Image (spheres, helix red, strand yellow):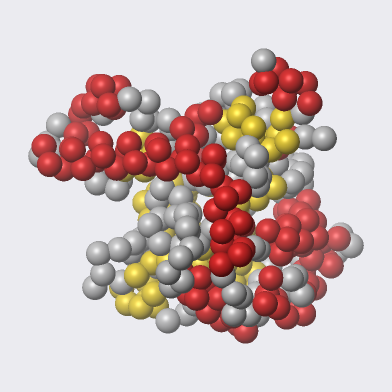
Amino acid sequence: MSKYAICQCYFTRNFFVDQLQTHCLFASTPQFLHDYADLIRNLGQDELKSILKDLAHERDRRRNLINGLSSVRETIRTNYKRKHPGIFNFQESRMLDERFSELVTEARNKRALDKITHHGRGVFSFPAFTPDFCQELVDELNSIEHHPNLPLNRPNTMNKYGTALDDVGFTNVVDTLRQEFIQPLCDRLYKDERFQLDSHKAFTVKYLDNDFKNDEGLAIHFDNAEVTLNVALTENFDGGEVVFHGRSSNGLNQQPPPIGINHEVGQGILHLGCQLHEALPITNGTRVNLIIWMRSSKHRNLRCPMCLEKPILEEVSCGYGDGFTMHQSQNDEHSH
């Protein structure tokens, strides 16, 4: 039986520095100051100290998250009373837009996919969730986020606001969605890739308008995923278009014309994790999106998508890690 793992690059690579709007390597303070001398040359001392403090905090957060995740999830499970208990169990008719269910049936039966829009370069959109489910999920997550005694983790280094769904009890729901609905769809849409989507990371992100000193948009990036599903859960906002570029392997200087997609409540946007994309700032209201990063251990065990090298694995005691798997022989080597 395989165990899930992270690549050790998780503790040093892809630290997002908001002031620089880029991801950085942070192995040590001297290394950072040397490698990014050109980027930080014009920063004041106070701003540089703030960046270094944030980087050190993020490094410690990642280590503590790996070591303490099971305790975090148990604390949430025992201290939080669910507001909408029904949404913690997968119910197709309650959660999924009937057109999504029909689309997946078409994919399974190898019929024409009439209920999906192809925007080009492997970016697709389709009706995914019912409005009622979107509202209930947002309401539940608001209740969780405002609970005074829950040790919630931020979803990633780029987003300050949002909730890790696996931490608060949605793993089984997302497992079913991934295995029974997204997998057969990807078998049709990305058949040459032959993804076996055996794990995920699911979280929400929240963008607030510029009346707040909070997340408004998101810089160009790619995802730590083989395939990503992005679903808008709210509609009371203006702006916030998601813009797709080419694949990360092409580099920023050799990109095709961008593809822009406006969010609609319940609409799912499906794309490859290596697709460069950005979220434009919202100009009014609040936007909440569900993001599901789906991973294929068969692919990433050969090459980590973040450091682009053969992964050096570290087993995790809880959850899916970053979607890598360690087999028994690797576990034995790791223990010596």
Taking 102 as reference, is 214 above or below it? above
Of the pair 90 and 152, the residue shown nearer to us:
152
Q: Quadrant of the C terminus?
A: top right
Taking 264 as reference, is 12 above or below it? above
Based on the displayed image, in which of its 4 quarters is residue 130 positioned? bottom right
Q: Residue at x 22, y 34 (%)?
A: 39
Q: Is residue 234 left or right of residue 133?
A: left
Question: Is residue 274 something that shows in the picture?
Answer: no
Q: Residue at x 74, y 20 (%)?
A: 332
Of the pair 109 and 95, the residue shown nearer to us:
95
The x and y percentages for residue 118 are: 63, 61
The x and y percentages for residue 288 are: 47, 70
Of the pair 63 and 256, the residue shown nearer to us:
63
Q: Residue at x 54, y 40 (%)?
A: 66
Question: Is residue 62 something that shows in the picture?
Answer: yes
Based on the displayed image, in which of its 4 quarters is residue 45 positioned? top left
Q: Residue at x 89, y 62 (%)?
A: 109
Taking 113 as reference, is 319 above or below it? above
Q: Is residue 84 left or right of residue 41?
A: right
The x and y percentages for residue 322 are: 60, 41
Q: Quadrant of the N terminus?
A: top right
Q: Is residue 14 left or right of residue 49?
A: right
